[in-house]
Image: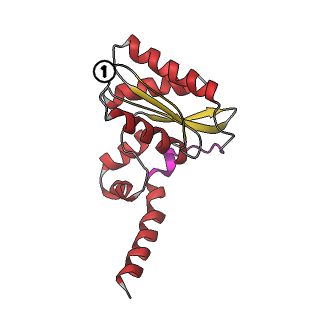
Amino acid sequence: MQIKSVLEVLAVVILALVPATASAQQLPNPYGAPVSLADAKKAAAAAIAEAQKNKWTIAVAVVDPNGTLIYYEKLDNTQIGSAKVAIEKAKSSAIFKRPTKAFEDALAAGGDGLRTLGLDGAVPLEGGFPIIMDGKIVGGIGVSGAKSSEDAVCAKAGADSLK
């Protein structure tokens, strides 16, 4: 067997096993039409309001169900690296139908949870939530810039603002 074939088989096995790690935390909701720009701004505003109330500096991103960026905003003095992290958290939560904390928890558990490292696009940092409207996943919101647990508080406020 050639090395490329062995790697392909290994990749298929890993990808087949990874969903079992966090499947209990995947939302059953189907995907819906993409979140509108107006709703994306509303979710971001709720996340920013939560951050400002707590004096946290954050970046917030809202994506559609495919992970395409719909809206982004960064508060003054937020570290530059938080921009990309917020976008990646939003993408991860939308495409995998779960909060990014599910991946953080799986990785922290070790053992089979380490398979999460092989899952392309899975961000194991708290702070990303799917956006659900009318029972359908219409996008994701990601926040970065504060502690991950604080990012999650802001992202949840944003996601909840559209329920």
89 vs 65, left or right, is left
The answer to if 11 sits in the magenta stretch is: no
Which image quarter: residue 115? bottom left
Image position, residue 123 (x, y; %):
39, 45
Query: 96 or 45: nearer the eye?
Result: 45
- How crowded pointer 1 is (Cα within 10 Å; few <14, some 14-19, many 20+) is rated as few
Quadrant the C terminus occupies: top right
Q: Read off the residue under disc 1.
A: 77
23 or 12: nearer the eye?
A: 12
| Magenta stretch: includes residue 23 | yes
- Residue plotted at (49% across, 43% down): 91
Residue numbers of the magenta segment: 22-30
Quadrant in the picture for the N terminus: bottom left
For image coordinates 50% across by 48% down, the residue present is 24
Q: Position of residue 20 (x, y in %)?
A: 47, 57
| Residue at x 33%, y 13% (from the top left corner) | 55
Q: Secondary structure at mark 1?
A: loop
Name the residue located 29 percent from the left edge and 52 percent from the top edge.
110
Judge whether residue 126 can be spotted in this image.
Answer: no
55 is higher (above) or lower (below) than 27? above
The three-letter amino acid code for the residue at tag 1 is Asn
